[in-house]
Image (tube, grey):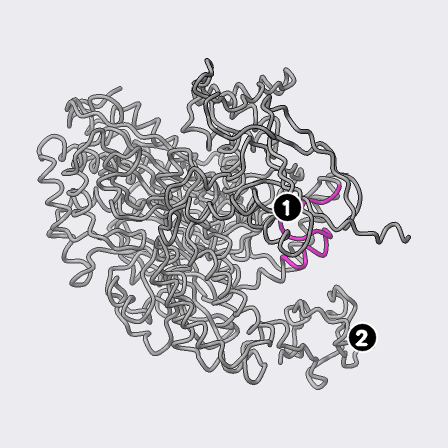
């Protein structure tokens, strides 16, 4: 027990960007021993690449310079560049962190930073490559399905949205490896596929139920009391709106207007529209579908 | 067959007439989404079956939506002369007797809603004050058959444009007609076309905005489902005028039938050479692609829509440079709403002079509204600009159900505002609605009675916009959420006296500082409800009461012992067993167990459940 409470009194800051440097110098001022771990060969981060900063148009170096010096001079800060964290264990207040320091091939104690070595270096102009993502492999059945969809759109980047829509319809969700595979095939970063997948409500990154209940939350439905019906379905299915039941039978989703306002309140289940709902009526429809499933 | 000239068009028109008005007569079923939702699919198959069984000669066909959604599913019996008998609320069970009477040569009177004569006269009250021009063919023609559209005069406007008008003349005609964008902004269409035409850069694009996200409006869906060719014809004429050879239709994916019908229409138009290379032998090329939306409200905003077509996330950009100059792929792009495009063939066919005679000084033509909410006759109505709200709500809409009192009508969707009884005689057009703090929007009209809480309404719209804000600019992303929180507090009885003032302040900032139309208009629902219903806000904040009995935390359900007959219906329906009582004796609601779901209120046949 007593061991659990023991605090080491030192702090590890991950990343030597402007935020990391500021945190490190604040902490060292407060009397902590600080380890500042940075993946790159030098601290400074993104800000060292900037000219001016928003919103005051201050020069980036003028903001960053004093912090560089402070971190470098402070005896309380141990700087670990070219390093990465491989393991963290322990509990708040007493962590043990394993740091892998990559070799620099330069004796840091004796280096004065004169730069002569870079001038003499034969390969100094070698461009720095971003790590290339290894190609994603799908199992052959999936690959066939996905390739079919991609090919209907001639594997063109501008059809990414349409491709994802078809994949969503095919799989009921967007599996991660499929998303990576598509990005790969279209020569796009995964992030752009991911940003579409999370931006549009049509997509889901988790599997959806066999029966997808889309309940309309449009104005006309709201005025005619759809909220109470949603609450009722949430109680019946023991999930909240946007979730899927554990047995993957139902997904309950709210949509912004199905365009059937004259029949409000409205929901669709697997594309079939049900209008003029009441609490009991909606509940019975779900029950009927559930029974048919059994 | 490719249509090469007027003779080909005339030949197809004759073919189409035979389909539209066959000599045997025709039975058509309204099979748009709202019809299908009420079971018109079953009615259709029952009709086909009975026709076969009883040996009826009349042809059975499909059509779009007649607009009168309240009485769906509708079946129309059309005589060879073109008289239309509309039957309401059909079911598969009613089909047999209808077919039996028709087979013996009578026109059944049971279930008849009314007649529309061949020249369009009708005694049906719902249609009496309407002027159905753009939606005239919805519910008349088969949306999956281009021939029927051509039979009603379709693609004649396109022919007259490419055979005898210069692009400048077309633009001039549209400009003189005074057509304004029907999507909500009300920007003069002719001017937009002219700017796009004059902007440097090739190729130019035309886009049809069918991302109808406004909750409470569905006229674009109905047009695309019921008469997609009118939209395509408008686009082809527009492309000719602007000098474009490539177009896009951006449709919501939530409208599967609209997507299907547009795709069919595009294929058919290609088949007849109305899309593609060398349209009608004129040397003019134009083709259309259909793009499905991903379900983001903000994609109705033009720059966001363009980004979405490019396969990016649908975030708007600041409009220092309009899409007319740099739009899709940085090329001049003209974007119009579905209804705007559908107006174009009409104007060309009948002339700008004819068009300017309809409507008010600065708003010409007709507008389709979706009349929904607490109203007797819900549906899509097309009325001339300048009609009063009173005529719309009481003459066409038939007033408020259950003899409740009219409270307000919400127009313009989440960007619009509420209009009260005081302004019922206001002529409806772009400028008048803006004057009273609302807007035309895409044409949703949600009628509210005294059981609608205005604070809850404002909260609803903020909840909507909070979800739909794309998050690019801070005022909208943060401000709308803060407003939503304040309104939620007010609805939960935690409102503070200074809240109304704070809401006003926040609204002013968002209005000024937001990036796109969504943010600029986001505070409208609050500003207009505060303007007209400040007393309701104060009742929530000071008295901790919701006068309409909507806000859950501020209401209690009780049973009036004198009115209760002890039928036990409410106790049976109560999901939490909060209602206790013996048979034929007054029941009591346990307030601790009550979750205020309102089932007891809905199920009570004696009005014994009271909301306070």
Q: Compared to B157, does B412 lie above or below? A: below
Residue drawn at 63 percent across, 23 percent down: A103
Residue drawn at 19 percent across, 32 percent down: B201
Q: Compared to B600, does B25 lie above or below? A: above
Q: Chain of mark 2?
A: B
- Where's residue A218, x and y in %? 49, 56
Tag 2 near tag 1, CB within 8 Å: no
Question: Circle 1 sits in a helix, a strand or a loop, which is it?
Answer: loop
- Where's residue B371, x and y in %? 40, 60
Residue highlighted by disc 1 = A75
Q: Which range of residues does the magenta coloring cover?
A: A230-246
- Where's residue B185, x and y in %? 28, 55
Q: Is residue B60 visible to us here?
A: no
Q: Residue furthest top?
A: A122
The one nearer the camera, B182 or A63, is: A63
Q: Is residue B36 visible to us here?
A: yes
Q: Is residue B170 left or right of residue A77?
A: left
Work out which quarter of the rendered image holds the N terminus of chain B and state it: top left
The one nearer the camera, B423 or A53, is: A53
Q: Compared to B61, does B101 lie above or below? A: below
- Where's residue B260, x and y in %? 43, 34
Marks 2/1: CA–CA distance: 75 Å
Residue highlighted by disc 2 = B580
Question: Circle 2 sits in a helix, a strand or a loop, which is it?
Answer: strand
Q: Residues within 10 Å of mark 2 (few under 14, many from 20)?
A: some
Work out which quarter of the rendered image holds the C terminus of chain B and state it: bottom right
């Amino acid at each position: 027990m007593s061991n659990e409470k023991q605090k080491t009194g030192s702090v590890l800051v991950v990343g030597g960007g402007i935020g990391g440097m500021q945190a490190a110098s604040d902490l060292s001022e407060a009397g902590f021993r600080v380890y500042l771990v940075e993946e790159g060969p030098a601290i400074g981060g993104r800000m060292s690449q900037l000219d001016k900063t928003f919103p005051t148009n201050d020069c980036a170096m003028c903001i960053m310079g004093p912090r560089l010096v402070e971190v470098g001079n402070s005896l309380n800060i141990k700087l670990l560049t070219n390093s990465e964290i491989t393991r963290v264990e322990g509990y708040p207040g007493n962590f043990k962190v394993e740091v892998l320091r990559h070799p620099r091939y330069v004796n840091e104690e004796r280096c004065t930073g004169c730069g002569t070595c870079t001038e003499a270096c034969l390969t100094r102009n070698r461009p720095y490559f971003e790590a290339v993502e290894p190609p994603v492999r799908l199992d052959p059945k999936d690959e066939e399905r996905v390739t079919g969809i991609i090919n209907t759109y001639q594997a063109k980047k501008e059809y990414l949205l349409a491709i994802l829509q078809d994949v969503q319809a095919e799989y009921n969700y967007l599996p991660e490896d499929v998303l990576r595979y598509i990005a790969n095939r279209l020569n796009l970063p995964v992030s752009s596929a991911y940003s579409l997948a999370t931006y549009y409500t049509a997509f889901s990154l988790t599997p959806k139920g066999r029966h997808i209940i889309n309940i309309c939350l449009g104005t006309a439905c709201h005025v005619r009391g759809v909220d109470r019906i949603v609450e009722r379905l949430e109680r019946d299915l023991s999930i909240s709106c946007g979730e899927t039941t554990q047995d993957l039978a139902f997904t309950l989703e709210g949509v912004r207007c199905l365009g059937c306002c004259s029949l409000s309140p409205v929901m669709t289940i697997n594309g079939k529209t049900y209008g003029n709902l009441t609490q009991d009526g909606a509940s019975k429809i779900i029950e009927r579908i559930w029974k048919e499933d059994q | 067959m490719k249509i090469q000239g007027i003779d080909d068009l005339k030949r197809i028109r004759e073919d189409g007439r035979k389909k539209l008005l066959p000599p045997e007569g025709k039975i058509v079923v309204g099979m748009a989404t709202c019809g299908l939702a009420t079971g018109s699919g079953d009615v259709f198959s029952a009709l086909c079956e009975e026709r076969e069984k009883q040996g009826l000669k009349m042809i059975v066909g499909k059509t779009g939506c007649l607009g009168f959604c309240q009485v769906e599913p509708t079946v129309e019996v059309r005589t060879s002369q073109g008289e239309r008998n509309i039957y309401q609320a059909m079911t598969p069970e009613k089909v047999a007797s209808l077919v039996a009477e028709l087979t013996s040569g009578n026109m059944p009177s049971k279930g008849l809603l009314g007649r529309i004569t061949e020249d369009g006269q009708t005694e049906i009250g719902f249609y009496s004050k309407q002027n159905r021009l753009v939606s005239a063919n919805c519910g008349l023609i088969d949306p999956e058959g281009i021939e029927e559209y051509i039979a009603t005069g379709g693609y004649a406007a396109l022919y007259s444009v490419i055979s005898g008008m210069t692009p400048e003349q077309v633009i001039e005609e549209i400009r003189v007609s005074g057509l304004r964008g029907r999507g909500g902004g009300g920007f003069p269409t002719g001017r937009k076309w002219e700017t796009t035409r004059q902007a440097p850069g090739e190729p130019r694009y035309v886009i049809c905005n069918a991302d109808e996200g406004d909750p409470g409006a569905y006229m674009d869906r109905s047009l695309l489902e019921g008469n997609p060719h009118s939209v395509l014809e408008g686009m082809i004429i527009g492309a000719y005028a602007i000098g474009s050879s490539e177009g896009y239709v951006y449709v919501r994916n939530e409208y599967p039938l609209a997507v299907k019908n547009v795709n069919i229409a595009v294929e058919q138009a290609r088949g007849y050479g109305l899309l593609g290379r060398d349209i009608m032998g004129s040397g003019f090329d134009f083709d259309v692609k259909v793009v499905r939306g991903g379900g983001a409200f903000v994609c109705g905003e033009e720059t966001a829509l363009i980004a979405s077509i490019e396969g990016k996330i649908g975030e708007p950009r600041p409009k220092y440079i309009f899409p007319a100059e740099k739009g899709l792929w940085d090329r001049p792009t003209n974007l119009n709403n579905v209804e705007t495009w559908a107006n174009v063939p009409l104007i060309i066919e009948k002339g700008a002079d004819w068009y300017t005679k309809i409507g008010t000084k600065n708003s010409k033509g007709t507008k389709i509204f979706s009349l929904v909410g607490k109203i007797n006759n819900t549906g899509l109505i097309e009325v001339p600009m300048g009609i009063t709200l009173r005529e719309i709500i009481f003459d066409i809409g038939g007033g408020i159900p259950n003899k409740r009192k009219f409270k307000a009508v919400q127009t313009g969707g989440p960007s619009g505002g509420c209009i009260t009884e005081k302004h019922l005689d206001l002529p409806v057009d772009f400028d008048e609605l803006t004057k009273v703090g609302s807007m035309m929007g895409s044409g949703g009209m949600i009628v509210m009675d005294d059981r609608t809480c205005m604070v809850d309404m404002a909260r609803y719209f903020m909840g909507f916009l909070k979800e739909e804000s794309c998050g690019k600019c801070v005022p909208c992303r943060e401000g709308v959420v803060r407003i939503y929180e304040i309104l939620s507090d007010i609805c939960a009885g935690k409102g503070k006296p200074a809240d109304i003032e704070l809401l006003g302040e926040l609204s002013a900032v968002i209005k000024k500082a937001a990036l796109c139309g969504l943010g600029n208009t986001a505070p409208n629902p609050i500003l207009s409800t505060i303007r007209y219903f400040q007393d309701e806000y104060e009742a929530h904040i000071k008295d901790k009461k919701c006068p309409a009995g909507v806000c859950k935390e501020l209401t209690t359900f009780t049973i009036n012992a004198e009115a209760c007959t002890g039928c036990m219906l409410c106790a049976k329906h109560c999901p939490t067993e909060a209602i206790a009582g013996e048979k034929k004796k007054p029941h009591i609601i346990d307030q601790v167990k009550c979750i205020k779901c309102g089932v007891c209120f809905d199920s009570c046949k004696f009005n014994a459940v009271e909301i306070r």
